[in-house]
Each structure stands twice: as C-alpha cells, then as structure tokens.
Amino acid sequence: MNTLTVKLPDDLEQELAAATAREQVSKSELVRRALSRYLSQAAGREEPFISALEQAGDLVGCLEGGPADLSTNPAHLAEFGRI
C-alpha cells in the first residue's frame, strides 16, 4: 500500500477527527472510503444505495412466534439495556 501526505486546514482536520470517532475507523480508512466514493462518482460508476432492508431482505419475517406487538409495545422494552 502506498502513502500519501495531505495538508488539511484546521477546521477540516477537526471534522475528520469527529467523523473518525463517530465511525470508529482510522483517518486513513475514512479518507480512503471518501476518495474511493468520489472517484466512483466522477467516473459515473457509483453503485446504487442499498438499504439495510434490501441487504437483509431474506431475513425479514423469518421468525415465527413471539409477541405480535414486539416493535410497538413499550412494555417489551421495560428491561432493555439493564443488566
């Protein structure tokens, strides 16, 4: 893998640091992703957005049983996140 040095203004560096913390990836990884996406867009070969539902579509509705109101009834979340 090659190395590229880039000079960034302070405000862009701060945004980059915030984004890496939020995404939990290195600065290098985030810049690689952004550059790859930019180059794909510029070449007109950007892949279409695929939603989580499309990616896991075969799993949606595959569970049988359980409460019918699991996603809407707050009582089911009463103990959620508690140890």
Image (cartoon, rainbow, N blue to C red):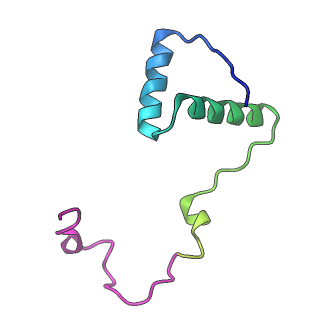
Q: Magenta stretch? A: 60-83
Residue at the extreme front of the image, as rendered: 1
Name the one closer to the observer, 62 or 23.
Answer: 23
Tell me which residue sits at (61%, 64%) in the image. 55
Q: Residue shown at 78%/31% (left/top)?
A: 42
Quadrant hosting residue 73: bottom left
Q: In the rendered image, which quarter contains the C terminus?
A: bottom left
Report the front residue among 83 and 36: 83
- Give the percent coordinates (x, y) of residue 53: 55, 65
At x 73%, y 26%, the residue is 2
81 with respect to 46 (left or right): left
Magenta segment main secondary structure? loop
- Is 43 colored magenta in this rendering? no
Using residue 65 as the reference point, say whether residue 16 is left or right of it: right
Q: Nearer the viewer, residue 3 or 36?
A: 3
Q: Establish if 8 lies above or below 60.
A: above
In screen coordinates, is 10 left or right of 37? left
Residue 76 painted magenta: yes
Instruction: Give the image location of residue 24, x and y in percent.
Output: 45, 40
Which quadrant, please, contains the N terminus? top right
Picture coordinates of residue 77 (x, y %)? 22, 69
- Residue nearest the observer in this picture, 56 or 24: 24
Residue ID at (30%, 71%): 72
